[in-house]
Image (spheres, helix red, strand yellow):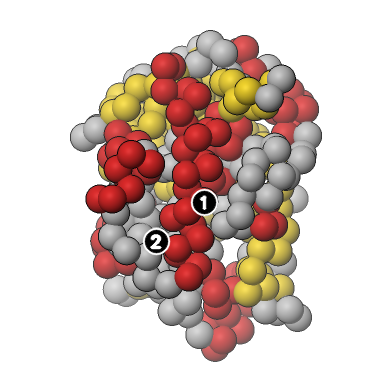
Amino acid sequence: MQRFQLGDVEITKVVEWQGEIAPARSIVPDSTDRVWKEHESLLVPDHYDPRTGMYRGAAQTWVLRSEGKIVLVDTGVGNDRHRPQMPLFDHLSTDFLDRLAEAGVRPEQVDVVINTHIHYDHVGWNTRLRDGVWTPTFPNTTYLIPKTDQVYFDPRNAHRRRAPRDEQERRRFEGSRFVYADSIAPVLGRAVLWEGAYRIDGNLSLEPAPGHTPGSCVVRLSSGSDRAVFVGDVLHSPVQIVEPDWNSCFCEDPGRAAATRRALLERAADERELVVPAHFGGAGAVWVRREGSRYAVASWEPAAP
């Protein structure tokens, strides 16, 4: 369990799953073997295994305690899901709710759930299976879902989506129907479908960060002199800090995703914002700095265990 404080906000990372997911160069298709090798000191052991060439990542939730409320940033994969697009997580079974309890959070205590975007590994614990029915896991919460993504992933609007670029994307598009049915539709009665920008409280706000999905967003934290930005899947690997034009294989609009990534890194470096991606293992959060026209990792927060 990792905890740290920024201003008046307490931050806790609760890991659902971590390990090897796929070959690193399939996760970041534009990358080269040279760059993964050149940056081994940055990537090993939490983000990359040089012996296997595999990308390592985590599915996790960031718990924010702000102004007396408990806010969850993303809800991972979830148990009992049919996930043909990612066999590794098909019918996953973890003790995530027990880990959340170890962090001092019971489902009924959660006030706000933020889905940074509608992909299977960010919305799974929105619901749980009870007597064969998907029901909200957090009964007293408000679910904050980007309206652009809700409209885009609603199966009734599938005819509006562009054609898949390859077989892998076709499987993802088809799998998104299951994600919507088991993790989004059951919570819409408790959801705010926001667009433009959204203020959660005096410390936390939401802003669009499109590209990875049409409605991808970031969570900005500003408390006292401290700043952070929870970037969801704008970053999948630290190699995208040193090479921000490289997208993950999951980005639906590569050009826009790269522009969003570069803008976020520029602001984080210039305004000293802690960058908190969804899937980084180890410490999980990173301070970035400029190196001329490029960016680099300055340090991790908190210190890796």
Residue located beneath label 1 in the image: 175
| Picture quadrant where residue 134 is located | top right
Q: Is residue 65 left or right of residue 18?
A: left
Q: Is residue 67 left or right of residue 90?
A: left
234 or 158: nearer the viewer: 158
Q: Is residue 100 left or right of residue 297?
A: right
Q: Percent position (x, y) of residue 231? A: 42, 47
> Image point 53% across, 64% down: which residue?
237
Residue 223 visible? The answer is no
Of the residues under marks 2 and 1, which one precedes in the sequence? 1
Residue located beneath label 2 in the image: 251
304 or 155: nearer the viewer: 155
> Image point 42% across, 17% down: which residue?
189
| Picture quadrant where residue 192 is located | top left
Amino acid identity at mark 1? Gly
302 relative to 252, above or below: above
> Image point 25% across, 50% down: which residue?
160
Q: Percent position (x, y) of residue 15? A: 68, 42
User: Could you say which disc has been placed on residue 267 in the image?
Assistant: none
187 relative to 228, above or below: above
